[in-house]
Image (cartoon, grey):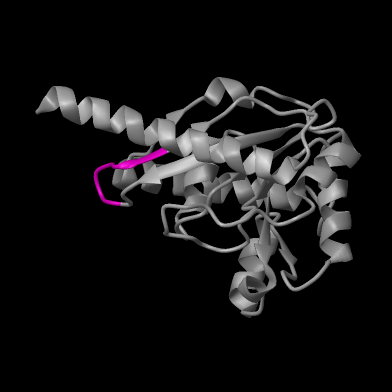
Amino acid sequence: IGLQLSYGGTLGIVLFYRKLLKMIKVIMNVVYQPNVEGRENLICDTGFILAGNHKSLLDIPLLATAVEQNIRFMGKKELFENSLCNYIFTKLGAFPVNRDGIDLKSLKTAIRILKNDEILGIFPEGTRNKEVELLPFKEGITLIAMKTNKPIIPFGISGKYRIGGGITIKFGEAIDFNKVEVDNKNDYLRDKVNKLIIKIKLQKNVVLFFIY
């Protein structure tokens, strides 16, 4: 039970992921020393969606370090065009998405992953964004959550990607969008992510205030 995965396959993905994850965790914890907050919100054994901002290519290994379970990331199809990258990403359980228009194949894959009680990792902005203001979130994420009856756990990443520490990942409380009554659920999720980023910055400002 639980050994057959929904994309590409088998126990091999899990074993490959675990071996690589051990190496990644050592590198990330020793070199970048991320500060992780809100891990208590990740306690869910029925699968969920992780959704948050995307500033750097390091976000994926940092998130993989912060979360104990295997995360199945949805990535832009361009990342899979290189044969080596395609091999590694597929072995890690990631899958491509075409950002131009509606990609039915990736949507079906995402739904299968969640129905298999796995974790789906998504960057709703659709691309890396180093600006202060978040980009509009892509449509469909909250619909996937509602169709599969899975919660979305928002996260915010803020700080400097520097050796010795400086980056913080903060996980918020799970959101059941079948119970959220707002006009625009995408904007609601975006606001939740934005508030997490603001909290990280405020906490750092308070620390600096007392230091100086």
- Residue lying at the far left of the rendered structure: 212
Magenta residues, as a range? Answer: 162-168
Does residue 13 appear left or right of residue 202 in this picture?
A: right
Front residue (pair 104, 130): 130
Residue at point 56%, 39% (across, down): 193
Locate residue 71: give its quadrant. top right
- Give how far across and how far down residue 38 sits, in percent: 51, 25
- Give how far across and how far down residue 206 sits, in percent: 25, 25
Does residue 35 appear left or right of residue 171 in this picture?
A: left
Please say whether residue 160 is one of the residues in the magenta stretch. Answer: no
Vertical relation: 201 (above or below) 143: above
- Give how far across and how far down residue 187 sits, in percent: 67, 44
Please say whether residue 165 is one of the residues in the magenta stretch. Answer: yes
Q: Main secondary structure of the magenta part?
A: loop
Does residue 6 appear left or right of residue 207 in this picture?
A: right
Front residue (pair 198, 154): 198
Locate residue 35: give its quadrant. top left
The C terminus lies in quadrant: top left
Front residue (pair 57, 64): 57
Vertical relation: 8 (above or below) 164: below
